[in-house]
Image (cartoon, rainbow, N blue to C red):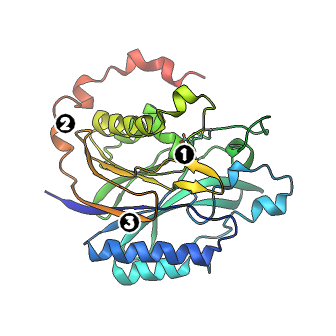
Amino acid sequence: SRIMTVAAAQMGPIARDESRQAVVARLIDMLRQAKDRGADLVVYPELCLTTFFPRWMMEDQDEVDSWFERTMPNPAVNPLFEAARESEVGFCLGYAELAQEDGGTRRFNTAILVDKAGRVALKYRKVHLPGHAEPQEGRKFQHLEKRYFEPGNLGFPVRRVMDANMGLCICNDRRWPETYRVMGLQDVEMVLCGYNTPTDHVQDPAINRLSDFHNHLSMQAGAYQNATWVVGVAKGGVEEGSEMITHSAIFAPSGEIVAQAATMEDEVVTFACDLEMGRKYKETIFNFAAHREPDAYRLIVER
Ligand code: CDT
């Protein structure tokens, strides 16, 4: 066996006026709890340095950009990098990224995986952006990810980090089987996924009441069908009046939930994951080389 003890560091709400310094102090507190429980890796949620700002329409570009990080690390986040390096714990962090790239300003919903030495070992930019580019009438809260971000341009890379084949995805990505399969084809062993999921996200009560079910269903299926560990981490609770799901959990390659958060607040959930566990599925029912039939799947990559 090859054990990676992982900590899902769920967050309760972040207030609109909460400073990055205050949020980073919360992150460090959870990192220390995780370290005390023997964690190798701490996984934080999507966009975990600020409140979930895509719920609001903002016209002023300076205001929009105030939610973004221009460099990573930066002075506000440095104490987290230092605490992690000192504790020799890796971490995964979601944030809004403002980049100068290809001669222009680009904005992405990004996650990084930082190794135990404090180096950024893997970077991912969210591919599946939910919601709208224009505000929708009659909604208490908007979901304007399509306005504030562009789709990620890095694909779904899998890298050897901390002696494991690691992959990242972000929130809405977890609902799409292609997300996991592209990483499964790269022999991923653990997928890390932070999320912010309002309970009214499809504006249909019959579907909204299933929010928690669909959250786990997606990650259990992704884990099982690709024989990988999945770590799903919420920022949830009632944030600025918007209700968001919690139930952060760790999913085994069997598709089983092996650990789950019990609160709607900052909470650390740990599990010692055997990275070899997926092997028995990868060699039998999900032996891709033996059983996949890619010629029958061509429609999937058509526009
Ligand atoms: N953050 C994020 O991607 N949330 C979506 C819900 C919003 S859909 C308008 C999710 O899939 O959980």
Q: State the image quarter where residue 88 is shown.
A: bottom left
Q: Give the Cα distance between marks 2 and 1.
A: 30 Å
Identify the residue at image location x=55%, y=80%.
Answer: 78
Q: Name the residue under label 1.
A: 197
Mark 1 / mark 3, whichever is N-terminal? 3
Q: Where is residue 4 in the image (x, y as percent from the top left)?
A: 25, 62
Q: Does the residue labelled 3 lie within 8 Å of ligand 1?
A: no
Residue 15 location, quadrant: bottom right
Within 10 Å of disc 3 (Cα), the crowding (few <14, some 14-19, many 20+) is many
Mark 2 or mark 1, which is nearer to you? 1
Identity, as a three-letter code, of the amino acid under mark 2: Tyr
Position of the C terminus by quadrant: top right
Q: Which mark is residue 42?
A: 3
Ligand 1 lies under 8 Å from the Cβ of mark 1: yes
Q: Where does the N terminus fall, quadrant-wise? A: bottom left
Q: Is residue 233 above or below residue 226?
A: below
Q: Which amino acid does label 3 sit on?
A: Val
Q: Position of residue 79 (x, y in %)?
A: 52, 82
- Judging from the image, what secondary structure is the residue with disc 1 in? loop
- Amino acid carrying label 1: it is Thr
The residue carrying mark 2 is 281
